[in-house]
């Protein structure tokens, strides 16, 4: 076998394993074997760029090149479906269809998946384009991002597919992935996604497809378009599509009578709660394509299909009290305490009230009967008040507290933010305990064996007042306090000791500086060799770092302006935490770009934007976000923004391309 054949055989094999794993849920080889084969293919492809292929399984890992999406016109407009909410409306539709066709017809009943719709174009069995719905006429070309979704075939199976066709479906974030992502975002103090739909569409629009790849999206396909589809039946065509490698829901059924349709709806209204992805209704489609053509479209939607939307699960219950929680950053979260009520299989006692503005908008009073909904969100929320039930003797109006429920400090509200904060970060107990819990968490210092109860006990006993105190704890103290076994106490001490090896970037994250999540911490660690450098950085230097905006810069400056924080960092340095980049990262440094300020713009071929940033920094240069009088030169890739180009030209700033830049460093 020559190299080319070898590469092709490996690609075919990996496509097959991918399909077995992500579509059929029936892997034939272990994850490790799969990874080994993938690595083998990557190596071969790197060594033989002449055999590159845009649809190789290696393309699924994504790239970190930033791009603005190209707008593409849809060949067939992407219409929406008419919505119905009652059996009556469904029978009206059925009667209309029946009258218009005046012959027998079958209805294909399907799940309505609650994600973001996508149109995929295949030519000669290969995925050539993936476009979002956009305004229905044109959408964003998100092909690179879609290629990272493992259940979408890049190359089709068999040979029965039309030479050219379009297939539409829904991109979804499975519940488990959504919950994991939100937990991670909460830990990083990033805004949470309200539901898997927003998470899926937000992810699909990310500029960096390697992050998309890490988010584990899934896709179900439900609509084929093209001139040469194999059958007249929509259902039959979907079954063929499944054979070509697409993930097609097997919940789909053909029914003839209204009774059968209603039975399908009522069964799935309940059974859908066990599905791995969010659904919000049932779609009914006249099965025959000939009959579909006969029925045609209105301006907005097909006459041959309709959506039946499930009722958002809602419960009515009494509001007894509003309590307030203080987070580790001092943010105050109002929580509704309710009469226990059954909702989507769980008993709800508490619901989120988000912030003061939402409380005000609801005009909440204690004792009100309130509507609670889950509708996709993890934490139930109050969506309304039954004001009629309040008609006589309303309870007290809910007014957001003015002082911290834990330490009594007067609350503050920062400009542009919805939340109130307790500013007493040095002495407010939940803030102190919250910071310790964050510090020891798995993604930060990864200290095992200490839970919130133990932290609370240490705090109560005055043993731990800040995270530096952890490093002087003895096994004996832990044992007597927590009444735990000798071995467990020793394990905790050992785990605390091991945390001294945790790398610099995670130590920065562990400090719990507001808005400095994992990603930002990595960027900071890359831009500043040590915490001392970070401490000395001024505003302009900070905002010059990739992805560090005004808000983060202000927060870092405020953190180091606080003497208590500097004292803590000094104590942690003294016990031996990693507060500088490891030696191996620092090697390969030069001062070839010393004193130079370089702006990066456009899309690059040889290395990623982040790689170029690292190169600039490693060679003593500074990377800045925008062109100014200080700019030494612009490192320009393809499609450099016209405004930037114009500005650079006007200011007489040198434009250096990728090759010239690499030459400069070599
Ligand atoms: S068929 C011309 N089938 O619902 C109609 N749509 O409001 C083509 N959706 O934009 C759509 N599950 O994003 C169809 N089984 C299903 C669906 C489905 C979810 C979404 C889709 C569409 C919206 C219509």
Image (cartoon, rainbow, N blue to C red):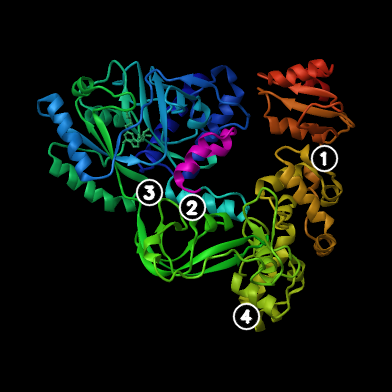
Does residue 192 appear left or right of residue 506 in this picture?
left
Total count of labels: 4
Query: How far apart in space, not on screen, are marks 2 and 4 (Cα)?
Result: 32 Å
Which numbered circle lies on residue 541?
A: 1
Query: How far apart in space, not on screen, are marks 2 and 3 (Cα)?
Result: 12 Å
Label 4 secondary element: helix
Query: How far apart in space, not on screen, are marks 3 and 1 (Cα)?
Result: 45 Å
Label 4 CB, ligand 1: below 8 Å? no
Q: Nearer the viewer, residue 393 or 79?
A: 393
Residue visible at 43% across and 71% down? 393
Residues in magenta, as a range: 194-213
Does residue 506 appear left or right of residue 565 in this picture?
left
Task: For marks 3 and 1, give the one nearer the viewer.
Answer: 1
Task: For marks 2 and 4, give the one nearer the viewer.
Answer: 2
Label 3 secondary element: loop
In the image, residue 622 sits, relative to residue 86, either above or below, namely above
Question: Are circles 3 and 4 on residues that touch, CB within 8 Å?
Answer: no
Q: Reading the chain from its start, which is encountered first: label 3 or label 4? A: 3
Which numbered circle lies on residue 276?
A: 3
Does residue 222 appear left or right of residue 662 in this picture?
left
Residue that numbered label 2 is attached to: 179
């Amino acid at each position: 076998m020559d190299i080319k054949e070898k590469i092709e055989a490996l690609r075919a094999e990996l496509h097959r394993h991918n399909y077995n794993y992500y579509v059929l849920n029936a892997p034939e080889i272990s994850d490790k074997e799969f990874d080994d084969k993938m690595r083998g293919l990557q190596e071969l492809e790197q060594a033989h760029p002449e055999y590159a292929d845009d649809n190789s399984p290696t393309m699924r890992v994504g790239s970190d090149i930033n791009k603005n999406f190209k707008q593409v016109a849809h060949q067939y407009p992407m219409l929406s479906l008419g919505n119905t909410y009652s059996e009556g409306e469904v029978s009206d539709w059925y009667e209309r269809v029946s009258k218009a066709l005046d012959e027998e017809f079958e209805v294909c009943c399907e799940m309505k998946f609650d994600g973001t719709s996508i149109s995929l174009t295949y030519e000669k069995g290969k995925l050539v384009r993936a476009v979002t719905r956009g305004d229905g006429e044109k959408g964003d070309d998100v092909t690179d991002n879609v290629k990272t979704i493992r259940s979408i075939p890049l190359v089709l199976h068999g040979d029965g597919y039309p030479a050219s066709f379009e297939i539409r479906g829904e991109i979804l974030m499975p519940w488990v992935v959504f919950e994991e992502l939100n937990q991670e975002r909460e830990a990083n103090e990033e805004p949470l996604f309200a539901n898997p739909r927003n998470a899926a569409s937000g992810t699909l629009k990310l500029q960096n497809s390697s992050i998309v790849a890490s988010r584990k999206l899934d896709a179900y396909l439900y609509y084929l378009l093209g001139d040469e589809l194999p059958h007249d039946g929509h259902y039959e065509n979907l079954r063929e599509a499944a054979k070509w490698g697409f993930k097609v829901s097997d919940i789909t059924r053909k029914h003839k009578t209204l009774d059968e349709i209603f039975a399908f709806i009522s069964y799935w209204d309940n059974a859908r709660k066990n599905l791995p992805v969010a659904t919000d209704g049932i779609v009914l489609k006249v099965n025959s394509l000939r009959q579909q053509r006969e029925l045609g479209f209105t301006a907005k939607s097909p006459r041959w299909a309709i959506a039946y939307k499930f009722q958002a699960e809602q419960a009515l219950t009494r509001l007894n009290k509003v309590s307030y929680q203080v987070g580790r950053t001092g943010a105050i979260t109002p929580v509704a305490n309710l009469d226990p009520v059954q909702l989507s299989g769980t008993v709800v006692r508490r619901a989120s009230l988000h912030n003061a503005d939402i409380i005000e908008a609801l005009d909440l009073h204690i004792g009100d009967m309130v509507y609670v909904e889950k509708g996709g969100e993890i934490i139930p929320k109050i969506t309304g008040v039954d004001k009629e039930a309040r008609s006589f003797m309303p309870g007290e109006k809910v007014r957001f507290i003015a002082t911290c429920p834990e330490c009594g400090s007067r609350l503050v509200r920062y400009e542009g933010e919805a939340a109130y904060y307790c500013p007493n970060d040095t002495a407010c107990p939940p803030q102190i305990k919250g910071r310790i819990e964050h510090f020891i968490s798995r993604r930060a210092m990864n200290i095992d064996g200490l839970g919130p109860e133990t932290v609370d006990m240490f705090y109560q006993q005055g043993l731990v007042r800040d995270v530096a105190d952890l490093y002087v704890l003895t096994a004996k103290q832990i044992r007597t306090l927590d009444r735990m076994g000798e071995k467990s106490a020793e394990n905790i001490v050992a785990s605390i000791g091991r945390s001294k090896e945790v790398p610099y970037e995670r130590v920065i994250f562990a400090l719990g500086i507001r808005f400095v999540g994992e990603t930002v911490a990595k960027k900071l660690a890359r831009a500043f060799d040590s915490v001392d450098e970070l401490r000395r950085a001024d505003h302009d230097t900070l905002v010059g770092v990739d992805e560090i905006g005004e808000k983060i810069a202000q927060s870092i400056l405020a953190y180091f302006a606080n003497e208590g924080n500097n004292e803590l960092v000094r104590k942690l340095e003294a016990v031996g935490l990693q507060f500088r980049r490891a030696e191996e990262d620092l090697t390969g440094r030069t001062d070839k770009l010393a004193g130079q300020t370089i702006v990066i713009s456009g899309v690059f071929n040889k290395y990623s934007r982040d790689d170029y940033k690292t190169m600039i920094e490693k060679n003593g240069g500074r990377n800045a976000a925008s062109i100014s009088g200080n700019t030494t030169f612009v490192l320009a890739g393809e499609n450099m923004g016209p405004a930037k180009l114009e500005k650079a030209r006007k200011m007489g700033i040198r434009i250096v391309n990728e090759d010239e830049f690499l030459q400069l460093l070599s």
